[in-house]
Image (tube, rainbow, N blue to C red):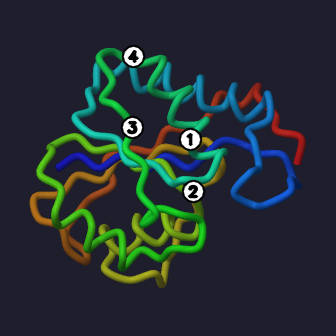
């Protein structure tokens, strides 16, 4: 399996609820930049699973609109901002597609990257907004994958943090 972990783009700092935070213009630009890099590598997706939060939904919509032959996004609560990596690993064990995109948040995505590649979170690599990590796996399990690459937004896109 090629597992692509995409952290949502920069979101507005506040909203009536955390789940309702929208992407900023810079956030959309971050995702568009990473989508162009993904598309230029001629990579494909067979499935896309997305957190129910608005910023993740907007991230998925922007990303998928810019790649060739995108799959429909499937919303799952298991990728919500309050979820943990162990739950996502259980979910991934049931996924049969070869090229899978997860659009979610931290800490779940950075934990997933660490657990699937290192088997623990001792040397956690934090995925910044708009980062996309590719983890190649023969078997879903702790330490069973390798990080093939991490795409980052064009550095000229400076979020208003």
Identify the residue under disc 3.
73
| Circle 3: element type | strand
Residue 127 — which label?
A: 2
For the residues labelled 1 and 3, say whether their Cβ atoms are less than 8 Å apart. Answer: yes
How far from the left and from the top, in percent, is residue 80? Answer: 53, 63
Circle nearer the N terminus (1, 2): 1
Against 1, residue 68 (above or below) is above
Gap in angstroms between the C-alphas marked 3 and 2:
21 Å
Identify the residue under disc 1.
57
How far from the left and from the top, in percent, is residue 41? Answer: 33, 22
| Circle 2: element type | loop
Identify the residue under disc 4.
40
Residue 128 — which label?
A: none
For the residues labelled 2 and 4, say whether their Cβ atoms are less than 8 Å apart. Answer: no
Circle nearer the N terminus (2, 4): 4
Is residue 34 found left or right of 140 in the rendered image? right
Gap in angstroms between the C-alphas marked 1 and 2:
18 Å
Gap in angstroms between the C-alphas marked 2 and 4:
21 Å
Q: Residue at x 51, y 36 (%)?
A: 60
Q: Residue at x 42, y 74 (%)?
A: 85
Q: Nearer the viewer, mark 3 or mark 2?
A: 3
């Amino acid at each position: 399996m090629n597992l692509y972990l995409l952290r949502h783009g920069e979101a507005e700092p506040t909203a009536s609820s955390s789940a309702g935070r929208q992407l900023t213009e810079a956030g959309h630009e971050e995702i568009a930049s990473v989508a162009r890099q993904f598309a230029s590598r001629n990579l494909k997706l067979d499935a896309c699973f997305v957190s129910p939060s608005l910023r993740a939904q907007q991230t998925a919509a922007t990303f998928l609109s810019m790649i060739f032959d995108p799959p429909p996004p499937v919303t799952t609560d298991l990728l919500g901002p309050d979820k943990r990596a162990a739950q996502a690993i259980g979910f991934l064990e049931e996924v049969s597609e070869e090229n899978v995109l997860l659009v979610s948040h931290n800490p779940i995505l950075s934990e997933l990257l660490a657990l699937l590649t290192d088997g623990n979170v001792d040397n956690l690599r934090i995925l910044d907004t708009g980062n996309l990590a590719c983890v190649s796996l023969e078997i879903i399990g702790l330490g069973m994958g390798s990080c093939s690459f991490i795409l980052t937004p064009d550095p000229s896109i400076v979020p208003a943090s």
